Image (cartoon, rainbow, N blue to C red):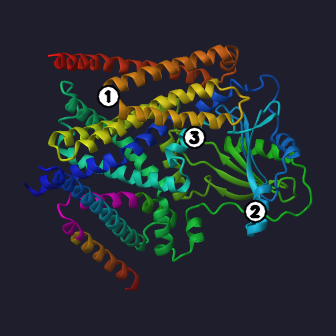
Amino acid sequence: MGAKMKTQLISNIAASMWTKTLLAVIWGLLITTSLLFNLNNTHWLDPDAMLLLGTLLSFVLWVSVMVYCLCSQHLWQASKTCFASLFLSVLINLGQIYV
Amino acid sequence: MSKKNSAIKNLTEAHGWLGVVFSIVLFIVFWAGSLSLFLLEINQWAELPHYPPAQNGQVKPLSEIIDTQLKQYPHQPETAMRIFLPNQDNVSYRVFLQVPDTKAAAKAAETTDNIKTKRLRLKVDPKTGEARPARSEFKLINFIYRLHYDLQLSRFGLYFVGIVTLFLLFALFSGVFIHFKKIINYFFSYRTHKTRTQLLDLHNVVGIMSLPFTLMYAISGLVFNLVIVFQIVFVVFIYQGDQDKMISDAGFSGFEAEAMSGRTLDMSKLDQLLADKQAQYGPARFVRIYNYGDETAAVELFGKGQGNLEPRYELAFRLLDGKLLQESGVQTINVFKEGRRVLSSLHFGDFAGFDLRVLYFILGMAVAAMIIAGNMLWINKRRNNRKVSDKVTTFVSNLTLGSCCGMIFATAAGLLLERTLPLGLAARGDWVIAGFMAITVATAACAFWLSDKKRYIANTLYTSAAILILTVIASWSMFANTLIELWAQGIHSVIGVDIGLLLSAALCGFIAWRLRPLSQSISTQTQHISEA
């Protein structure tokens, strides 16, 4: 493999990892936010207990979504599932608020 | 390739790549954090030989201590003063006053800001009442502690360490997924016949054994450093912008004192109230006093706890009549506040004895070694399959070894400087910090020049061991009598740290000794080959 091709390959891998990681972080944050809202809307705990549970769960959920995204071969595959989950969670949120 | 194998392959790639990107910061965080477990002891080790506590006399009451300081320093009574009480861990009163800041006041006059006071930290001998500014001469361990949580970069550093901790949690989760099948089978394997398998086994075994500990550190670290993200989320989406309501629900709304009346109050009431309430609720760690000397004066007591995870009280009383104004942790328990405190206790290892902190220290150091081993694995793998250029792998390898050896060497040298620099030296604390930084950079730079890496590591460890022994010798040649007196007074931390330094020197020497013959044999082989 020529030196130029090798450099190209390395920069492609790095660029794809940065993009993948950034997207994983963003999907994780969005889905976690929406799921926390779902959880809060159930009102099954006192506000202080809900805050603690939310704080602890938030990071675990965030990282779990990141793990899922970075498991996937292609970004669009992970994004499709993440978008579907987020959409479902937002629908539930809207249902909890308005129904 | 099956879907499952492909997922594990992708995850392994991400685990290694993110690990390499953030490994040096993680190493610094774990190294500095492990040392900071003994922050109190190392602070006492640095200070007490120079400022031994008075042996004779009674502990002066708090009101007398405060009155003496107020004659010297113009504390603003409408702002709260905070005082840490002396106990078996702290030999002195630590007093925090708010005094006029003439520089800020001049600036505020220009910019219409309201910042006109600054915090003054004092350490006061409980028996003589003699005060001296805290943290001015002995800065090393506080500097290392700040490296642990914000890399000395203030708020930006705090959030950056938070983001790095998020990737640590990712590395833990992905590591468990990658090794899930092999966790039991490979748990007891430690294959020493090849460097790669040795590093891999070290990485895996330490990773699995320390998993609960590292998980706890990652989650509690995230709660400390990156909770701002979800605070914003909670305020915006759940509390509809009502930040005060969220703070109140979280139990952090704080105590608000009455406005000052202008009528004076005999503050000796403070000592009686402290004695009564501590007898009733248990020892207090620190107190906060509002409107000192005024009839509206109030005192907040913060419980010390009994070395366990039980709730700690926070009580506010009016001094005039001893009326309870606010209470938390006795009858009213806020789940969030107590949960956060439990996380904090788990993080700092202060819920049990000294032996637990030693265990935390060993685990912390093992995780730091695991991080370096993971980095070396990534480098070796990339070198073998030639996916990454030699320049990149050499650079990452040098940076990893350099920063690791730099921190070890700089810590040893920093301790020597902390012990030997004269007290009269202007900006002594800053000199120690400058020395620490310069040595870290210089040692790290050597990794880029020297080709025999094992010899480089061995030499760094040998020198660090020698410096640690020299520090102990300096300690005893300068303060032998004081050290013995401190021990006799029941203050064991000073000699305890010296013993810790000797053990660390022995460990450094042992590792260097194990590395050196290998290095020499490699050099001899290389020489024979070149001669042939």
Q: Which residues are magenta?
A: A57-79
For the N terminus of chain B, the image quarter is: bottom left
Does residue B425 lie above or below A70 as drawn? above
**Nearer the observer, B171 or B344:** B171
Element type at mark 1: helix
Decide: marks 3, 2 in contact (CB < 8 A)? no
Q: Earlier in the sequence, mark 3 or mark 2?
A: 2
Which residue: 83% across, 25% down?
A: B57
Decide: marks 3, 1 in contact (CB < 8 A)? no
Element type at mark 2: helix
Q: Amino acid at mark 3?
A: Phe
Q: Amino acid at mark 1?
A: Lys
Report whether residue B208 is seen.
no
Closer to the observer: label 3 or label 1? 1
Confirm whether circles 3 and 1 share one chain.
Answer: yes
Image x and y of residue B121, in percent: 73, 44
Decide: marks 2, 1 in contact (CB < 8 A)? no
Q: Earlier in the sequence, mark 3 or mark 1?
A: 3
Q: Residue B200: give its label.
A: none
Q: What residue does disc 2 label?
A: B107
Image x and y of residue A79, in percent: 24, 69
Image x and y of residue B466, in percent: 48, 18
Left or right position of B239 against B73: left
Image x and y of residue B274, in percent: 77, 44
Q: What residue does disc 1 label?
A: B453
Which residue: 13% across, 50% down?
A: A2
Q: Report the residue that reaches farthest toward the front.
A: B531
Q: What residue does disc 3 label?
A: B143
